[in-house]
Image (cartoon, rainbow, N blue to C red):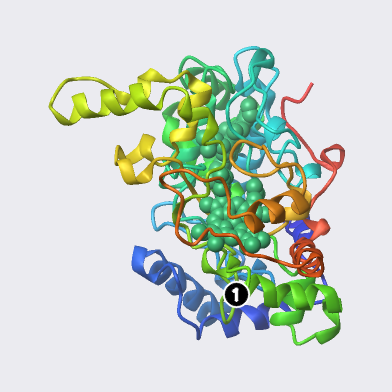
Amino acid sequence: MLKMLKNLRSPSIPRFQRGRLALTKVNPYEKGGLGGVFQNEIFSLIFLGGILAGLAISANAATPLGLPEVPVPADNPQSPAKIELGKQLFFDRRLSADGSVSCASCHQPDKAFTDGRPTAVGIAGQVGPRNAPTVLNAAYYTSLFHDGRADSLETQALGPLTNPIEHGLKDYSPVLELLRTDPDYRRLFQAAFGIGPEKAEPSHIGKAIASYERTLVCGDTPFDRYLYGGDPSALSESAQRGLRVFRRKGNCANCHEIGLNDSLFTDNRFYNLGVGFKRLQARFTQFVAAYKQKVEGVNVDPASVYDPRERSELGRFLVTGQVADIGKFRTPTLRNVSLTGPYMHDGSQKTLEEVVDYYDQGGEQNPFLDPAIYPLHLTKQEKADLVAFLKSLSNPECMFSPGSFPRAGEN
Ligand code: HEC
Ligand code: HEC
């Protein structure tokens, strides 16, 4: 755990001090009720100091420059044993139908927890329709997946295991069996949950993996040192100009938010940029006809007119069934974006230059295009500056070689 955290933060910044400062600001998670719980935890840590510090993990202690405290749900507090258990599960290939796939197959620590591919490849080489997003800072999202269909890391983690083209398990019993029989897992499970491993349930798998993921926070980038660390030399002149374009002419911060005390570079909302819309076009008339039938009470799934790859492009619609959500995807964080390409939910854009050109041309025209996406008329210099700025949002220290990492079941 400590080793992991060390990998994720720069030793030069006094973290405890930063954490204390962060207590005075408005917590964006207050609304969801998590902020309050979490802050209480921090207060007890401060008041009880060393005694509690040894027993509980404070996400706060590891909060890097430029990020808020990690929200932790009341029913799944962080603990070293649970984090360790989650870490082992995350890297364990035995959690798949043929022993070939772990979470880390698609979320590789040395690739900033992505796979570097346009779209993910799961068990038996099956190619999925969507790009694997980074798990770094996923702890801050209010909903998970490109279309926001999971509302917590706990639920999210259970999805890939039984996804036929990811881990390919029929149900969770092989994982539960492993927790009950493997001596290392038995010990960790008992320590993490205080109950015997024979009582293991799928929710424990989700909780442990989520706890590990909440340690994968990554800030303290040149941008953070410039804006929050009081170091004007942390950004090049070009990146500083790029920050202005990002906030003003480019309108980027409208969705990829920059805050007064910290920045997640996402507003956790959903927008249509037109990415991948072409895949919907061919059968759009059939889709509309099926949708009308549904509205009239016929039991039909309008999305079924599409094959899986096309269907994926319906985006948020797949979750809400609302026409206005067609082709909408969640604003992703831009932290570590220079390390997480290719880009967009379908991995269709290879470079940051390509992404900037895409925005400059006003996205891809379609009936649902968001009004905040329009031709920007950026100059060549402004585009270069914007790219320089985007490159200042990464911290390569957050990547580490899997070889240096203890992994149960990796053989
Ligand atoms: C076969 C590749 C693959 C495997 C294996 C895999 N994932 Fe993913 N992961 C993806 C893809 C693709 C998405 C996006 C899917 C979507 O949006 O529909 C994703 C999304 C996520 C997200 C949401 C991130 C965000 O920005 O919302 C998290 C967290 C995550 N995965 C964690 C895990 C965990 C934990 C495991 C193991 C239990 C795992 N993944 C296994 C490919 C994979
Ligand atoms: C209207 C909201 C909105 C605005 C304005 C906006 N973005 Fe985005 N951005 C998004 C959404 C939503 C996505 C994901 C789209 C998808 O996956 O299809 C995204 C994706 C990206 C990505 C890809 C990230 C990844 O990991 O795949 C980059 C880079 C990016 N935006 C940069 C910018 C820049 C630079 C600007 C300004 C020129 C900008 N954005 C303006 C909402 C917005």
Amino acid carrying mark 1 in the image: Asp
Residue at 48 percent across and 39 percent down: it is 156
Residue at 79 percent across and 69 percent down: it is 385
Measured as percent of width and height from the top left, residue 166 is found at 59, 23
Instruction: Give the residue number, with chain letter if any, for mark 1.
Output: 262
The correct choice, above or below, for 40 with respect to 173 in the image is below
Q: Quadrant of the C terminus?
A: top right
Measured as percent of width and height from the top left, residue 36 is found at 39, 71
Q: How many other residues sit within 10 Å of disc 1, few (<14), some (14-19) or many (≥20)? A: many
Q: Is mark 1 within 8 Å of ligand 1?
A: no
The correct choice, above or below, for 119 with respect to 274 in the image is above
Residue at 71 percent across and 53 percent down: it is 357
Please state which of residues 42 and 312 is positioned toward the viewer in this rendering: 312
Please state which of residues 230 and 205 is positioned toward the viewer in this rendering: 230
The correct choice, above or below, for 26 with respect to 58 in the image is below
Please state which of residues 396 and 393 is positioned toward the viewer in this rendering: 393
SS assignment at label 1: loop
Quarter holding ligand 2: bottom right
Among the 4 quarters of the image, the one containing residue 236? bottom right
Residue 194 visible in the shown view: no
Residue at 38 percent across and 19 percent down: it is 305
